[in-house]
Amino acid sequence: MTDLSDYQQVLTPNYGVPPTIIVKGVGCELFGQDGARYLDLAGGIAVSALGHCHPDVVQALTEQANKVWHLSNVLANEPAIHLAKALVDATFADRVFFCNSGAEANEAAIKAARKAAFDVYGPEKIEIIAFNDAFHGRTIATVTAGGQPKYRTGFGPMPEGFTHLPFNDCKSLEAQVSENTCAVMVEPIQGEGGVRPICPTFFEKIRAACDRVGAALIVDEVQTGMGRTGKLFAYQHSDVSPDILSSAKSLGCGFPIGAMLCKEWISEHLIAGTHGSTYGGNPLGTAVAGKALELINTPELLSNVTERGRQLTQGLNQLNAKHQLFKTVRGQGLLIGAVLKDDYTGRSGELVKLTMQMGLMTLVAGPNVHRFAPPLIIAESEINDALQLLDQAYAAFNKQP
């Protein structure tokens, strides 16, 4: 049997040393190699939207695995066409490009926006405006778009043409957008940046600024999409419609798949040979995602997201009244962050360790935010169980020096 010492010997150390080895998952529960049981409020970092080993998703994967796994994009396959049509029908988009991750989806979004601007306006229109504390992936382009220098250090030189502005700052946006701006890239809720929701007015200002200069609005919904906020995609809470949208994480509910959705005025510039992905749109991934979309995009499940999100937020606020750890609890649906008070700056990781010791999987969103992104199917009773465990963990945290 393998153990964590084997992990340290054969895998690169970029993830640190994990606390345990997980061998099984069912619904909202995970089971460790040592027999420990965990209630999952992390969801594989907002991935396991339908929990672990959902029987309908397992069936979709198994059935497709008995037909064909891989073709390459020289040939078409039915699951990819069905999924693309379903995404187009459910969103603003006219066309879909499939890939394998959120970073790849954002890379495609950046390239598509740049190509459309080049073809229509010429080579000077290259600026991508993004925002401080954003996270868009770890490829060279997406880590440059991300507004967190710690992820770029040591990997330079970075690609040119990216500008970072303060998030939710209308004045800086208005001052920066110009005829050379080809796109503005934004998350409806900054996930890794601290679970910070976009201000509705700021979102509207971005759309208006893009329209004014012929720039594309790229909305990164890798973390917020596929029902996480109580709508299929978070932009649908507003009247703002993107030109390009990136999706991954919950799109495959644990199976690797990403997608870049876009309007026709963008897609018409992605002619044959301009972009591609060997595994993108493979039959296995698109079969799984097609079933996931079918199960998630229902009034019943989206209502559960809203109700359980409200329950968890209210419960966290009640715990905070008792333990006095947080400045605020923010987020939407089942993407929630509890922001530590200044006295506890930098200690969110300690909370994650404590909750795990109590049998509860949680997340950080930077050093000062305790983040929750459970499966969207989580039940009322499971939220109650989680709140009891959090009560114990927060009490233990308060006893630490």
Image (cartoon, grey):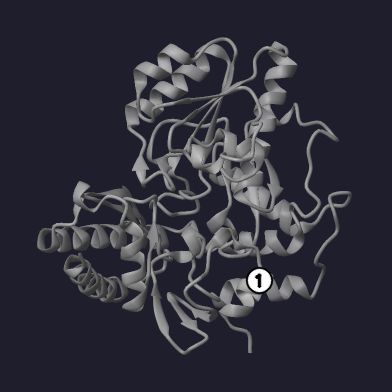
Q: Which residue is mark 1?
A: 60
Residue at 45% across, 54% down: 227
Name the residue at the left extreme: 322
For the point 39% across and 27% down, which residue is it? 166
Q: Nearer the viewer, residue 193 or 95?
A: 193
Quarter assignment of residue 350: bottom left
For residue 395, above or below residue 309: below
Where residue 355 sits in the image (x, y, percent)?
Answer: 32, 71
Is residue 20 placed above or below 171 in the rendered structure? below
- On the question of residue 346 being in view, the answer is yes
Is residue 261 visible in the rendered structure shown here? no
Residue placed at 70% from the left, 48% from the top?
A: 98
- The quadrant holding residue 53 is bottom right
Question: Quadrant where the C terminus lies?
Answer: bottom left
Could you tell me which residue is drawn at 58 percent across and 65 percent down?
Answer: 254
177 lies left or right of 307: right
Is 309 placed left or right of 63 in the picture?
Answer: left
